[in-house]
Image: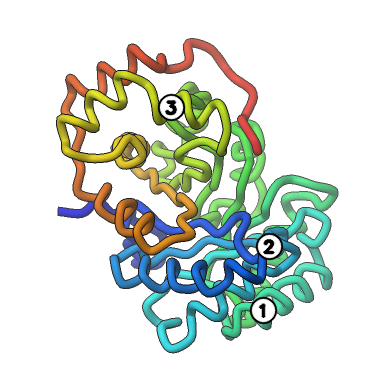
Amino acid sequence: MTKSVHFSHQATLPAIGQGTWYMGESRSQRAAEVAALRAGVEQGLTLIDTAEMYADGGAEEVVGEALKGIRDKVFLVSKVYPWNAGGKKAIAACEASLRRLGTDHLDLYLLHWRGNYSLAETVEVMETLIAQGKIARWGVSNLDINDMQELWQVDGGQQCATNQVLYHLASRGIEYDLLPWCQQQSLPVMAYCPLAQAGRLRNGLLNNNAVLDIAQAHNASAAQILLAWVISHQGVMAIPKASSVAHVKENAEALNITLSADELAKLDRAFPAPQRKMPLDVV
């Protein structure tokens, strides 16, 4: 059975979606990126996450192309820059995202990170966008526990549908306070960079002996084990980027991997959980 996460308004989504950071930056990659996104939807990875920031709107254009003829099968997420997250600027930013995406509504619209607008101003304009039918629900990204508690005190703030944060086996800071708080509120958490960023840290994860041993036992890749670990946590979904059809299929297969208590303990020993408050990891 594949794992899923319950979102507000009767939306239940597969626990792995598709991220699009770094898509839309190269014309030569466009056809491959569109094909990967469409293949992902066919594989059941029906949440697609993008942002006006990614490639200055280029990623949204790639997603728009991928959505042709299948928009109704996709739970579509985009994000607004903090300096656009209030008043008329937010309405204009949302409308521009919708144009690039070739759709009349977003299923979820996120504040990308905190900026100059107060949380109250952002909540107010998000609720306006819902009333206008441009978005179905709204949420936040890169907000730590104190930000979330502040949001909960804002009028309408508890309508927030998710918090999207960086989370992977080598970056577990949210487990100390933010993740338990979100779980207590039944607020889904979306993990971006669930395989870490490219580079040394990622290689350290993908080549770690504990990860490789468990991968071998499941006849799986190290990346699949890392995804299975992220989504083993209650209410957490992962949004890895995959720009090839083969990579997308590999991600989808991770939905069927269940790690045993012994395997989870082995990963804990290799990458211990935090024992104190950590600053929120942001990329």
Nearer to the camera, 228 or 134: 228
Position of residue 130 relative to residue 256, above or below, is below
Helix, strand or loop at label 3? It is: helix
In the image, farthest residue toward the bottom: 69
Tell me which residue sits at (60%, 84%) in the image.
Answer: 102
Q: Residues within 10 Å of mark 1 (few under 14, many from 20)?
A: some
Helix, strand or loop at label 2? It is: loop
The kind of residue tagged 3 is: Leu
- Residue 229 % position (x, y): 32, 34
- Residue 223 % position (x, y): 36, 39
* 267 left or right, relative to 184: left
* 32 left or right, relative to 58: left
Pair 1/2: label in front: 2
Q: Residues within 10 Å of mark 2 (few under 14, many from 20)?
A: some
User: Mark 3 or mark 2, which is nearer the start of the sequence?
Assistant: 2
Residue 25 shows which numbered tag?
Answer: 2
Helix, strand or loop at label 1? It is: helix
The kind of residue tagged 2 is: Glu
Nearer to the camera, 2 or 58: 58
Residue 205 shows which numbered tag?
Answer: 3
Distance between the Cα atoms at labels 1 and 2?
Answer: 15 Å
Distance between the Cα atoms at labels 2 and 3?
Answer: 26 Å
Position of residue 240 relative to residue 173, above or below, is below
- Residue 267 % position (x, y): 31, 20
- Residue 17 % position (x, y): 41, 57
User: Mark 2 or mark 1, which is nearer the start of the sequence?
Assistant: 2
Check disc 1 and report the residue beneath it: 100
Instruction: Tally the numbered discs.
Output: 3
Q: Quadrant of the C terminus?
A: top right
User: Mark 1 or mark 3, which is nearer the start of the sequence?
Assistant: 1
Tell me which residue sits at (62%, 34%) in the image.
Answer: 144
